[in-house]
Image: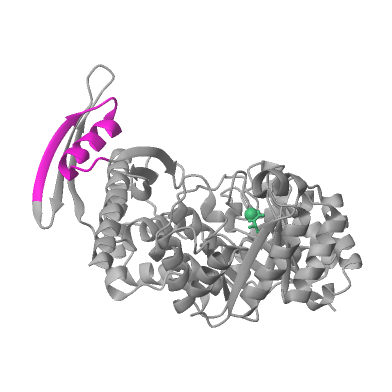
Amino acid sequence: MSKRVYIFDTTLRDGEQSPGVSLNAKEKLEIAIQLARMGVDIIEAGFPIASEGDFQAVKLIAENVKGPTITGLARISPVDIDRAWEAVKYAEKPRIHIFIATSDIHMKYKLRLSPEEVLEQTIKGVKHAKQYTEDVEFSPEDGFRSDLGFICQIVEAAIDAGATTINIPDTVGYATPGEFGKFIADIRSRVPNINKAILSVHCHNDLGLAVANSLAAVANGAQQVEGAVNGIGERAGNTAIEEVVMALHTRKDYFDYYTDINTKEIYRTSKLVSRLTGMSIQPNKAIVGKNAFAHESGIHQDGVLKERTTYEIMNPEMIGLIQNNLVLGKHSGRHAFRQRLLELGFELEQEEADKAFRRFKDMADSKKEITDRDIEAIVEAEIRRIPEKFHLEHLHVFSGNRTVPTATVGIVIDGELREEAALGEGSVDAAFKAIDKVTNLQVNLLYYNLNAITGGTDAIGEVTAKVKYGDRVFIGRGISTDIIEASAKAYINAINKLVYEEENELQKVK
Ligand code: KIV
Ligand code: ZN
């Protein structure tokens, strides 16, 4: 009989530790709701002691997200554990996740503690967490590089102290599949009380082996896999959970394991995480990359047309990717548009659907055929937005190869139109400088990315702009068939987020 693998999602904790990623509480909640819809078993919502923002986000998720277990990370100290509990205690199913490093390198240089002291702190920490909740996870950090004998000793002690999940991390992504599988099998066979806990793994992708290592661990007795959507995370990232899920699903004949993930929600979850984190997905990324189901060569296309399974091991519909050849255009009506929104999984309020329809009609004036990917871009970038303190009313650019680019912007602020003009190194630079003059905020552009949603010179351009204000980062997105307009919208969207958050924080202080 096939066995269950629990999926522990750390997109909002380890994933959010990706360089340049910063999500606000509302965005984290939106991702957590979608993770619950996708059916993950555990959501690691953050690291409550790390900052007030992290604490509030974990609490918000614990209060509002039903279904999965909600956990918060804590170092082994009582203050950390108390803070984690304060945030997760509102959850239907709360868990405290505690960790301490166990490798010689970490104990000697980072912690400056002896193995005996680490063992003692582990027992104390687990017991402390256990006062609050039955559900306690313990992770020996840098587990794979730790001495096997010591790991077994500490795991046994943690279980005796009450840990219900033992998670073995390959913190620095050093393992290879054969070794990691054996490491897990050894822990299973050497720790006498191991059956009293769920055995979990948490792999990093420094050598590109995180998914392979996680699967090798499952084949050797791991019952929980930790990872992040799209594989985001520290350095080269974490195990991509969609890859583990689809590998177990597609190769059930080989693994004979199952997960409770609704695979049809994978595509939507991946897009949401990419949009809110501003981390684009490489086109050839397994499962969710733009090319994952595209067949370019004639021989392959011919094969797929004759029999899909000649070159496709998975069906795109299994991950919720609807490949609809029907295109909408200028003459398509409200009903057809609404129908397509529903097919794509967007359940919009009437007002949002009307707004989306108006944007669709505007787009259809400059672009003959509107595809599903275009519709997704309209909804994701333009409909579900925070309030617009600054609204782009008009934009004029003057540029050429022998002239200094100039931009004029008209921006509505609280109902009043303000215009400014600026010169720049290029048209986008000029537009951003003109916007800066209107907003009068000292922001630094950290990152700019332009992506064409579909092919052709009339493709919708999708721009992601990351700006830094003080020590905080805000991500904005904008779309248009005109790339300068898409850029200006993305930049203004990031600034609107900044203003929104500053105002919200002020309100909390009052
Ligand atoms: O990579 C790691 O070791 C971690 C632990 C805190 C679980 O993220
Ligand atoms: Zn990690």
Q: Residue furthest right?
A: 189
**Viewer-closest of 107 and 455:** 107
The residue that appears at 34% across and 38% down in the rendered structure is 445
Residue 4 sits inside the magenta stretch: no
**Viewer-closest of 309 and 467:** 467
Give coordinates of residue 303: x percent, y percent. Answer: 72, 51
Q: Quadrant of residue 60?
A: bottom left
Give coordinates of residue 191: x percent, y percent. Answer: 87, 68
**Viewer-closest of 359 and 218:** 218
Q: How many numbered badges does the structure rendering display?
A: 0
Left or right of residue 426, residue 219 in this image: right
The residue that appears at 79% across and 66% down in the rendered structure is 155
Left or right of residue 58, residue 170 in this image: right
Left or right of residue 441, residue 384 in this image: right
Q: Is residue 450 visible?
A: yes
Residue 433 sits inside the magenta stretch: yes
Q: Quadrant of the C terminus?
A: bottom left
> Relative to 373, is 431 above or below?
above
Give coordinates of residue 217: x percent, y percent. Answer: 80, 60
The residue that appears at 27% across and 69% down in the rendered structure is 354
Q: Give the colour scheme of this rendering.
A: one colour
**Viewer-closest of 157 and 413:** 157
Q: What residue span does the magenta drawing correspond to?
A: 417-442
> Relative to 67, is 498 above or below?
above
